[in-house]
Amino acid sequence: MRGWVVGCLVAPLTLCVVCAGGSYLVALPRVRTNVSKQMANAVATSVAGSIEESELVSGKFVITEEDLNVNSQDSFGECGANVSTSGTIIYGVVTRITPAGLSLACMSAPEIAYTAVPVVEAGRVELTEIEPSSGTLGFVFTERNVEQGLEGGINRALEEKGLRPIALTLHDGSMTILVDRVPAVNASAQWAAALHSDGGHRR
């Protein structure tokens, strides 16, 4: 199969989508999925690092705006995503945290943004009250993949560190998350749970 690349450019409210290196047009859902995964990977790596550095003093740690930086490349004006067979590059997206919530916006056009209020529900960090952009940013950065990218990255980092969020507080430039440690589950218990959920049938 010949290579492909899709570019999403949001600069002066301009959107460009191109297919290069062959006649295969990549389906938009696939592009959006790759963008979501890249966002989650970037956030999970940064948040995990912050957890380690904090040493969980008083059972809490701080997530900064930089921890929620979803970019994989520096930008000098534009914002968007390039998706190709060699990977996904996100650039020019600015993350802001305030006591009212958080937002993702274009560096060159701050009015093109997603806003949301993070909360803790059922042992997970969830984004609520999501207000998607009405501009071209929404073509690739959809409400769904922004939610999956940020939520997925934060919760993956917590799960990998064996932590469960209890509550969070928003500040200017950061959020503080209060956590509990999740008891380790041994292999026998995991097998028994899997067997039970499978109706007692194993092949």
Image (cartoon, rainbow, N blue to C red):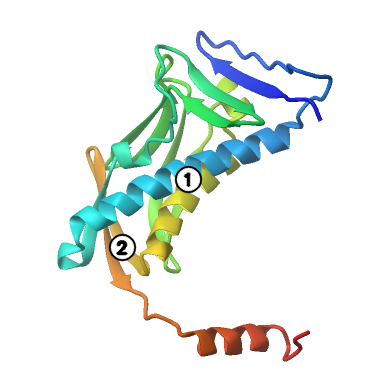
Query: Pointer 2: what residue?
Result: 167
Residue 92, horizontal then vertical, whole percent:
43, 22
Question: Given the image, on which type of amino acid does mark 1 rest?
Answer: Asn
The residue lying toward the viewer, choosing from 183 and 131, is 183
Q: Which residue is mark 1?
A: 41
Provide the secondary structure element on which disc 1 rests: helix
Badges 1 and 2: C-beta atoms under 8 Å apart?
A: no
Residue 35 visible, this orientation: yes
Label 2 secondary element? strand
At label 2, the amino acid type is Ala
Residue ID at (73%, 88%): 199
- Quarter-of-image position of residue 198: bottom right
List the single residue furthest toward the left.
57
CA–CA distance in space, label 1 to label 2: 23 Å
Residue at the limit of the structure toward the top, as seen here: 12
Residue 84: percent from the left, percent from the top? 64, 28
The residue located at (15%, 66%) in the rendering is 58
Q: Residue at x 43, y 20 (%)?
A: 111
> Does residue 169 appear anywhere in the picture?
no
Q: Is residue 80 above or below residue 156?
A: above
Which residue is at the far front? 1
Q: Residue at x 19, y 56 (%)?
A: 54
First in sequence: mark 1 or mark 2?
A: 1
